[in-house]
Image (cartoon, grey):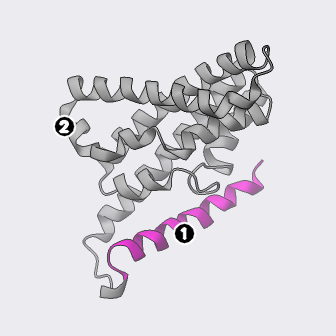
Amino acid sequence: MKELLIIAIGSALVNNVVLSQFLGLCPFLGVSKNVKTSAGMGAAVIFVITIASFVTSIIYKGVLYNLHLEFLQTIVFILVIAALVQFVEMFLKKSIPALYEALGVYLPLITTNCAVLGVALTNVQKSFNILESVVNGVGTSIGFTIAIVMLAGVRERIEYNDVPHSFKGSPIVLITSGLMAIAFFGFSGLI
């Protein structure tokens, strides 16, 4: 139980997928314009990464490893992730059309979000069992959600501040992201 807690906290805060590993920056920077949309993207990423961690772990341990087809892991993992994202996209389009419209092009980009594939490959690289893979996936996706919602909150506040003209838009967002990464680096002393 203690090891699972360390995996979850480590993947959410210490090795934050966005602010430490710099994976998944496209949706992080693109969708973080308001908190509501960011929370929706975070929920979609939590679902996709958690289920992808479970399914890819089963496929790797049950099929690829047993048949000595480990070299196919990246292709198989991408196919699994693409199928999951299609499911999320269909669900949101039917159930929550406003969020589907707000996420726009970034929802299908979860398929190519390197954070999702990165978690699946990390699970294999660290030889996590199925439960550890799922915990790592949940922790990583919660870390992504924390980071994107925090950035969205800061961006909403910055919008009403007097920012020098040369820093408006992308420059101030990148500076803010860099400062967040430095702040999250402080967690590395905890574990």
Q: In the visual, does 82 lie left or right of 127?
A: left
Cα–Cα span, label 1 and label 2: 31 Å
Residue type indicated by callout 2: Ala
Query: Looking at the magenta stretch, what is its main secondary structure?
Result: helix
Across and down, in percent, residue 45 comes to 46, 36
Viewer-proximal residue, 91 or 156?
91
Residue found at x 45% / y 25% = 84
Across and down, in percent, residue 23 comes to 57, 52
Range drawn in magenta: 167-191
Badge 2 element = helix
Residue 158 position by quadrant:
bottom left
Across and down, in percent, residue 28 comes to 44, 53
Badge 1 element = helix
Residue type indicated by callout 1: Gly
Across and down, in percent, residue 70 comes to 76, 27
> Which residue position is annotated with label 2?
98
Viewer-proximal residue, 103 or 85?
85
- Checking the image for residue 178, the label placed there is 1
Q: Magenta stretch containing residue 177, yes or no? A: yes
How busy is the neighbourhood of tag 1: few (under 14 within 10 Å), some, or many (20 plus)? few
Residue found at x 74% / y 31% = 71
